[in-house]
Amino acid sequence: MSLGLSLCWRGPPGSGKRHALQQQLQLWSRAAGQVYVVKRQLWDAPLQGGAEAGDGDGEVDAEDGGALLPMEVSLLHWGFDVARMSLQDTKYIKSILSRWGRGGQVLTAGQRCLVFYHAHLLSGESMTCLQSFLEENHQDTVLWLTSEHTLPSRLADWCLEIPVGGSDRALANLKVRSPTLKSLEDEIATVYAHWMSTEPKLSDVKRVRALVYALLHRNIRWTEGFHHWMFALELLPLTQTQRAQAARWCAQQPFTGPGQTVPSYRIPVLWEHYLLGLRRAVAPPPALTEQPATPPSKKPRSKKHAASTHS
């Protein structure tokens, strides 16, 4: 049985990319005369100096620095979520690729499918590993991805892109069940509303740093968060000057494309620099409180002073 080409479902968050991929796996399973059953389990990867990935039988004890990652397994595929890999996606990817083809989850005939959700969060090194993997294994392995942005050329040349449109249905369903739920976009809009109504102050630095720590605690990647803050600008009633300043500032930010690696120690600095620039860009124009200085009016000279002058 052949799964065909490597594919990438691309669309906005919550638009149904994962569902479309799962439907396609069900169709291929039905064509092979099998029942599509997905099993959830944990992937153990040595990330902190334990045994190298692929050594021995692949079992890693907690004492060896193994890190557990949720995965899905069927007769057709292995599936992983890059968003759950934190900033160590390259180590996970190397571990997965080194063990690919081992164990009992191997289809006896035809191609097998390796699935990565949120592939736009992959680092540049991970993209290189996957490109090399496809060059060596494209005859018996296909790569299926979901992504919110266009893939870099390393993987775009291998994957046929399938656009998926629509709004964030997952968030809409959550808000129906929990009307008081505040999404990340709502929180960003609240911050922007405050910035647009007040002039920049030195105390804004402390508030921006609090935002940075909140983003880091929620494990929001630099590239992902950059787009959240940038896209939220489209919803603001900005003046033409403010919009131009914000656009120039966003265009100057580094590492904003998919497949780019940002060292973890640089991320807080990038966040602080980016948010302070946005704060200045959307601030209200300075009030014209100081009127231009006018020369003092000349008082008419008294008659006594004029007479003394003529004399």
Image (cartoon, grey):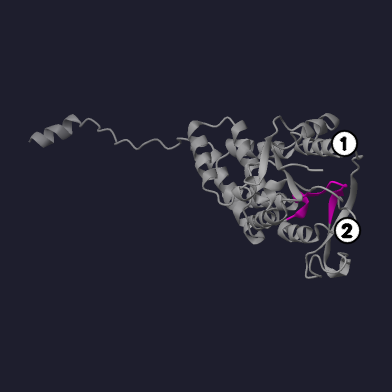
Residue marked by disc 2: 103
Indicate whether 52 appears above or below 109.
Answer: below
Amino acid type at image mark 1: Arg
- Residue toward you, 294 or 63: 63
Q: Mark 1: which secondary structure? A: helix
- Residue toward you, 291 or 299: 291
N-term mark: 1 or 2: 1
> Alpha-carbon distance for marks 1 and 2?
23 Å
Percent position of residue 260, x then y: 62, 53
In front: label 1 or label 2: 1
Percent position of residue 256, x then y: 59, 48
Residue at the spot x=71%, y=49% of the render? 220
Q: Mark 2: which secondary structure? A: loop
Residue at the spot x=63%, y=36% of the render? 232
- Residue toward you, 242 or 303: 242
Residue marked by disc 1: 30
**Left or right: 204 with respect to 134?**
left
The residue range painted magenta reads 69-86
Please tell me in which quadrant of the rendered image residue 270 appears: bottom right
Please tell me whether residue 70 belongs to the stretch shown in magenta: yes
